[in-house]
């Protein structure tokens, strides 16, 4: 039995403004919330993201111009309309784990501007990394994982190899609850880099893989912890992208499903020293 996203219905932009604190409280407690009943333009959406940032502490907010917009149609997924509504076309991942050592990505504000498909198609699945961590590991296993720093090598389209690093257990940026952070898109290329700051031995490497394989299996298979969002046009979904792994199902055409997302970060690139900004943002 899966979980649904709690909806907050609003009647107007004024009503949305009045309910903003309550909406963000739900988002913090449940890691996700959906606003329904209003259609926002991209500019209105950006203003909403900034107003939310003033309350949550994320960037964008009203203190500066920075924003990072993204339009998603899944046009790169060629066979998505020929597969079933429950078949995953964008595989499970935690968002931009490679950013964790730089400016972490903490939320998305996604505005489904176009949705002309079967309501059962193009669903987004989420699962909370905090809940999995607490459900599947003993205290001893958690203590082991806290000592693990992993790495993975990413091959860029131009052929360059980039090595990324991540602390496997990290506190949530706001609530401080512990969770797993691992790059699921490069899961098979992920290995234990350091254990307690030192090169790991074979036993430590084996234990790491056993524990982290359990996490990955849980993400894919645990339907009791799975949050399923069936979209309606106009939905404004606010997922906590530090905690929620997610995946997308098929059964739609690109022109029938289009959302605009604004990514929300822990700090502002404009106020961060250049060497602490993600290398890809620096063109590296
Ligand atoms: Fe994503």
Image: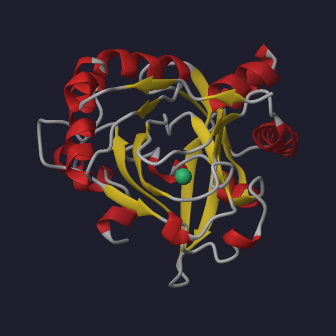
Asked where in the image residue 19 lies, by quadrant, the reply is top left
Q: How is the image coloured?
A: secondary structure
User: How far across and down, in percent of the image, does residue 242 sit?
Assistant: 51, 37
- Please state which of residues 45 and 132 is positioned toward the viewer in this rendering: 45
Against 273, is 221 above or below? above
Which image quadrant: the N terminus? top right
Image quarter for residue 80? bottom right
Q: How many marks?
A: 0
Residue at 58 percent across and 36 percent down: it is 244
Q: Position of residue 196 (x, y in %)?
A: 65, 33
**Could you tell me which residue is drawn at 69 percent across and 46 percent down?**
199
Q: Is residue 149 left or right of residue 111?
A: right
Q: Is residue 143 visible?
A: no
Q: Nearer the viewer, residue 234 or 160?
A: 234
Is residue 83 depicted above or below 226 in this figure? below
Indicate whether 226 appears above or below 252.
Answer: above
Note whether residue 176 is visible: yes
Image side of residue 155 versus residue 142, left or right: left
Figure quadrant of residue 51 = top left
Q: Nearer the viewer, residue 193 or 227?
A: 227
* Residue 78 horizontal/vertical position (percent): 65, 77
137 vs 262: above or below:
above
Please, which residue is most extreme toward the bottom here? 158
Tell me residue 195's x, y (percent). 69, 37
- Name which residue lies at 68% across and 23% down: 131
Q: Nearer the viewer, residue 250 or 273?
A: 250
On the rendered image, what quadrant is the C terminus found in? bottom left
134 relative to 109 in the view: left or right: right
Residue at 38 percent of width and 34 percent of height? 37
């Amino acid at each position: 039995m899966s979980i649904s996203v709690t909806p907050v219905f609003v009647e107007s932009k004024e009503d949305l403004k009045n309910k903003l604190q309550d909406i963000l409280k739900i988002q913090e407690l449940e890691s996700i919330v959906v606003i329904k009943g209003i259609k926002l333009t991209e500019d209105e959406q950006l203003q909403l993201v900034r107003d939310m940032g003033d309350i949550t502490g994320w960037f964008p907010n009203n203190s500066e111009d920075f924003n990072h917009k993204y339009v998603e149609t899944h046009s790169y997924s060629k066979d998505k309309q020929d597969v079933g509504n429950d078949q995953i076309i964008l595989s499970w991942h935690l968002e931009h784990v490679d950013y964790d050592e730089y400016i972490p990505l903490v939320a998305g504000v996604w505005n489904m501007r176009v949705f002309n498909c079967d309501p059962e198609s193009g669903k987004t699945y989420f699962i909370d990394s905090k809940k999995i961590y607490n459900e599947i590991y003993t205290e001893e296993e958690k203590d082991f994982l806290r000592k693990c720093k992993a790495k993975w090598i990413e091959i860029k389209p131009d052929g360059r190899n980039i090595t990324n690093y991540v602390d496997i257990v990290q506190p949530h940026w706001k609530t401080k609850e512990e969770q797993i952070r691992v790059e699921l898109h490069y899961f098979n290329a992920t290995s234990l880099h350091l254990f307690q700051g030192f090169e790991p031995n074979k036993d430590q490497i084996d234990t790491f893989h056993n524990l982290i394989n359990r996490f990955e299996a849980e993400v894919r298979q645990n339907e009791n912890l799975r949050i399923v969002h069936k979209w309606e046009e106009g939905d404004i979904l606010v997922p906590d992208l530090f905690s929620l792994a997610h995946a997308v199902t098929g059964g739609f055409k690109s022109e029938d499903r289009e959302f605009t997302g604004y990514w929300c970060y822990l700090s502002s690139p404009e106020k961060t020293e250049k060497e602490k900004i993600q290398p890809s943002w620096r063109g590296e």
